[in-house]
Image (cartoon, helix red, strand yellow):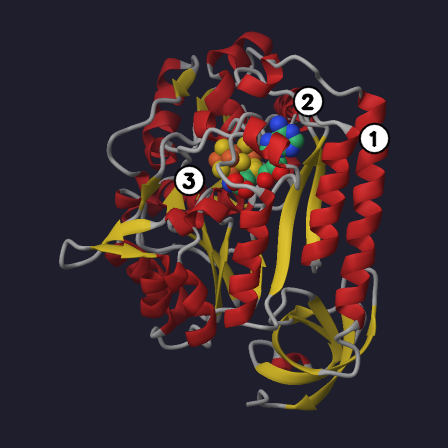
Amino acid sequence: MTDHPATTTKLKNLHVITWGCQMNVYDSARMEDVLRPLGYRPVSQVEHADMVILNTCHIRERATEKVFSELGLLKKIREDRLAQGHDRMVIAVAGCVAQAEGAEIIHRAPYVDIVFGPQTYHRLPEMVARAARAGGHVIETDFPVDMKFDFLPAEAAPQTPENLSAFLTIQEGCDKFCSFCVVPYTRGAESSRNVASILTEARQMARNGVRELTLLGQNVNAYHGLDAQGATADLPQLVRALSRIEGIARIRYTTSHPRDVTQSLIDAHRDEAALMPFLHLPVQSGSDRVLKAMNRGHTADEYRDIIRRFRAARPDLSISSDFIVGHPGETDADFEATLALIRDVGFAQAYTFKYSPRPGTPASAADFQVDEAVKDARLQIVQKLIRAQQDAFNGALVGRDVAVLLTHKGRKPGQVVGRSPYQQPVIIDAPEHMIGRIVTVRILHTLTNSLAGELIRETICA
Ligand code: SAH
Ligand code: SF4
Ligand code: F3S
């Protein structure tokens, strides 16, 4: 930071609060990168911040409600700071609520200085300057034609202190318009970064120590970016190019859509050693009626068939999904069909949600909304089934040797935590200097959401 020409500006403290999906985690880190040349450095305590960015999520009602209560707290912190003689704290709202609500945020919380959407944060320096000059509000929620990635600084700061595993956004937006979902409205149309820009960022991450990349996209397997020859590369081609980068040992991707699964992606799970045997492939429901109402564009059996093909290519592939219970029109029989699909597939883990009506989406205006009590009951049943499957999956690993990337210190002294190929956290006793290595661990027993193991070899099993 000290050698940057902008260091003549006073150092200022920035605090970013991140809610929502991994893409917001990536975006928040990039916002810090964009503001660094202006003298902003991240601080962990909001009370010390000269600027606070609330990076928000609009996916369910509860996520959106939290924004205004958090803003109330920030207003109070700003007043306390002013009373202590500090400069006025800048309050900015970013992310998907900012995109969806825009000026409405300023109406409800007039003390907010800046509102900007997920596609405009490369313009943050200009927004901060405008807010300071005008003393008024700045709202930037358009979808610019230029991709923000072309304007972000090349230098990306580590996303975690150890910097062994990092998110890398390769694709954004969604054209699928599922009946229930706000993402196509908050993130805009599907677009893919070009290959060169992704490779540059990945190489730099690898130079800074990253060993595991998680490629992000709302529909990550719809990726189709231009390569250096002007041809289109798909996700498996990109994975192949990334796996050649020195230091990158593991590649994951999320979230994929069943409609965009190709045979070459399935084959990549057989052929690319770096591609981890874990797949998050949301199905939402096991009922064809509900899948149709959701506009998912596939049937339950088509999903079963996709999973069968993936497992034929990579027998130990662990599968994860998202499920929504209580979509408008969902009957007991539809819900039973979801349970049947879960039993057929056998998931290693899954996220389960009660349907939450979202403004502007077709499902929110549909007849036959499901009773809240019914949604609650269904959620409990589905969660119990998933829990049992997760326990069974984890239990089956006990006694087996797996390759674990050691990523950080554990809570207890002498403990180190890592990640199995199947995505579970694994806790072992090992010296701290081994963090960063991929080692062979024998799984001893299961914990609630992780595994306990012992170090077997300081190298990985063949
Ligand atoms: N692009 C991803 C999902 C993004 S949103 C995909 O297509 O799968 C993450 C998850 O939130 C979704 O998979 C869905 O299960 C859930 N979700 C989205 N909108 C919702 C709503 N209105 N109510 C409840 N859950 C919702
Ligand atoms: Fe939302 Fe559907 Fe797009 Fe996923 S595919 S982001 S659930 S509209
Ligand atoms: Fe939420 Fe936006 Fe991600 S609505 S889930 S933060 S894309």
Depth order, front residue of 388/164: 388
Q: Amino acid at mark 2?
A: Gly
**Label 2 – label 3 distance at C-alpha:** 58 Å
Q: Label 2 belongs to which residue?
A: 329
The residue lying at 35 percent from left, 18 percent from top is 133
Task: State left or right for residue 68 relative to residue 314.
Answer: right
Query: What label sits on residue 10 in the rendered view?
Result: 3
Task: Give the quarter of the image for residue 36.
Answer: top left
Looking at the image, is 157 positioned above or below residue 361? Answer: below
**Label 2 – label 1 distance at C-alpha:** 16 Å
Q: Amino acid at mark 3?
A: Lys
C-beta proximity under 8 Å, tags 2 and 1:
no
Task: State left or right for residue 364 relative to residue 198.
Answer: right
Across and down, in percent, residue 227 comes to: 21, 57
Q: Circle 3 sits in a helix, a strand or a loop, which is it?
A: loop
Across and down, in percent, residue 366 comes to: 61, 14
Of tags 2 and 3, which is closer to the observer? Answer: 2
Q: Residue furthest top?
A: 107
The residue lying at 25 percent from left, 30 percent from top is 145
Q: Circle 1 sits in a helix, a strand or a loop, which is it?
A: helix
Across and down, in percent, residue 210 comes to: 47, 68
Looking at the image, is 426 positioned above or below residue 89? Answer: below
Q: Residues within 10 Å of mark 2 (few under 14, many from 20)?
A: some
Looking at the image, is 321 positioned above or below residue 393? Answer: above
Of tags 1 and 3, which is closer to the observer? Answer: 1
Q: Circle 2 sits in a helix, a strand or a loop, which is it?
A: loop
Q: Residues within 10 Å of mark 1 (few under 14, many from 20)?
A: some
Query: What label sits on residue 376 in the rendered view?
Result: 1
Task: Give the quarter of the image for residue 447.
Answer: bottom right
Q: Amino acid at mark 1?
A: Asp
**Label 1 – label 3 distance at C-alpha:** 52 Å
